[in-house]
Amino acid sequence: MSIRQSPRLTSHLPQWAGASALSALLLASTALPSAADEALADLVEEVAPSVVTILATQDAKPQPAGAQQFDRDGQPFGEFFRRFGAPDQMPRGQEGPRQGLGSGFILEADGLIVTNHHVVDGADTVTVRLSDDREFEAQVIGMDALTDLALLRIDAGETLPAVELGDSDVIRVGEDVVAVGNPFGLSSTVTTGIVSAKGRNISEGPYAEFLQTDAAINKGNSGGPLFNMQGDVVGVNSAIYSPTGGSVGLGFAVTSNIVDTIVADLKDDGQVNRGWLGVSIQNLNADIAAAMGLEGTKGALVSDIVPDSPSQGVLKSGDVIVAFNGTPVKSSADLPRLVGATKAGNDSRIEVFRNGRPETVTVTIGTFETAAAEVDTPMQSESSAKVLGVTVAPLTETARAEVGVDDTVSGVVVTSLSQDGPAAKAGLKVGDVIVKLGSEETKTPTALKKALKSEKTDPALVLINRSGNQIFVAVEIA
């Protein structure tokens, strides 16, 4: 067999070396695996037995006679039924059993297994298939939709190979990672890549944080582990971004530190008990920070306090939370995770900037039961139209009903605005209620006019209420 020679490769060889020497050189350089290859193969060999296949089955269910899937073929009036539906008295067909496929991993040698919530949600039977093809019916210990995690247990009658959770906080962007799972049902598939980003928020809820990776992750990888090069699990593969349905190098894994917290909670009583603060928060931007006299945009801005919540009487609208129990709060996305991981009844130390000065307050954390309120935007009056580009009216009972606010909200309602005015550019809409401008309450159009006249900050910090939710906006005063 001849090898096509490259002038680039042969230029440094003696003329007498010829093709045979080049062939030997090329074979020598490719025949032996590198130390990195050996390390990767050793890693996979060690952790692969801990990765399992999850089979989630929904039992056959009666199919409504009028359903689109009703089997009309063979019925005497099949075409009639196809057009107008079958009568309720007609015997109903069956929807066949459905089976979903995912991945998971053994976290404890006695059969404790981690997977995704969406893999087992709604299943009547969950079966775990081990790497040696043995199958066991699993007990669902608990599930948490807000972090897309589920905890299972099987009784294999023996000690199983388990893996350990690593510290997802210390892994760095650019580090090598390995994903093991069952994409498209192909068990024990291994892909490699790097950590592409940390701290990703992909709109999966306020309590989940993701590592982004370019390791190939496809359907069936859900619930499988993402390993660092020490063989520790640093994430649970949960989602991909793909316009085609296949991997395009944008995979997301729930961080192992969140997994650690959720697993401990689920093991305790089968459910997650989250702490609750009772505030609506938003990010700071440069305009809002300037309007508040702050340097930088780190922190979570409190836009509203939930009545009868742990924060009432302790935190205030306009506070900027910069640390929670000593942990810095870089953005509004950080706070729900920190509070949610805190047990109800614990006293927590919160560092805030209030009126431009640092303060520390203590809040006794409550129990999370319903989704926390979130926020939006609004603004002003006839006399202020030249300044803000809006007109406002008193907030009457009729107006309250129209804009969706209760009698605890006071302010003026925006009735119109100039599309080129500062208010519109800041995001205000007709129907928004202006509650405060700067530090002044704006209960009437006259009060708003007075607040505008005395306001010395540009942009001005405006507190608005939209459909019952409050938010701060920074509006440049024209």
Image: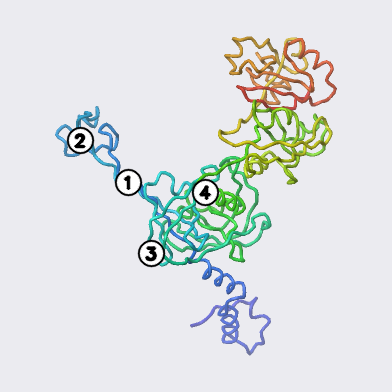
In the picture of the structure, the residue carrying the numbered disc 4 is 149
Amino acid residing under circle 1: Asp
Q: Is residue 54 visible?
A: yes
Could you tell me how far apart the alpha carbons at marks 3 and 1 are, in whole angstroms? Answer: 22 Å
What secondary structure is found at the residue carrying circle 1? loop
Q: Nearer the viewer, residue 330 or 381?
A: 330
Say if mark 4 contacts mark 1, CB within 8 Å. no
Of the two numbered discs 4 and 3 on the same chain, state the one appearing first in sequence.
3
Of the two numbered discs 4 and 1 on the same chain, state the one appearing first in sequence.
1
Say if mark 1 contacts mark 2, CB within 8 Å. no
Say if mark 2 contacts mark 4, CB within 8 Å. no
In the picture of the structure, the residue carrying the numbered disc 3 is 134
Where residue 27 sits: x, y (%)?
Answer: 56, 81
Tell me if 454 is positioned left or right of 127 in this view.
Answer: right
What secondary structure is found at the residue carrying circle 3? loop
| Residue 91 numbered mark, or none | 2
Could you tell me how far apart the alpha carbons at marks 1 and 2 are, in whole angstroms? Answer: 19 Å
The residue sitting at 37% across, 47% down in the picture is 124
In the picture of the structure, the residue carrying the numbered disc 1 is 59
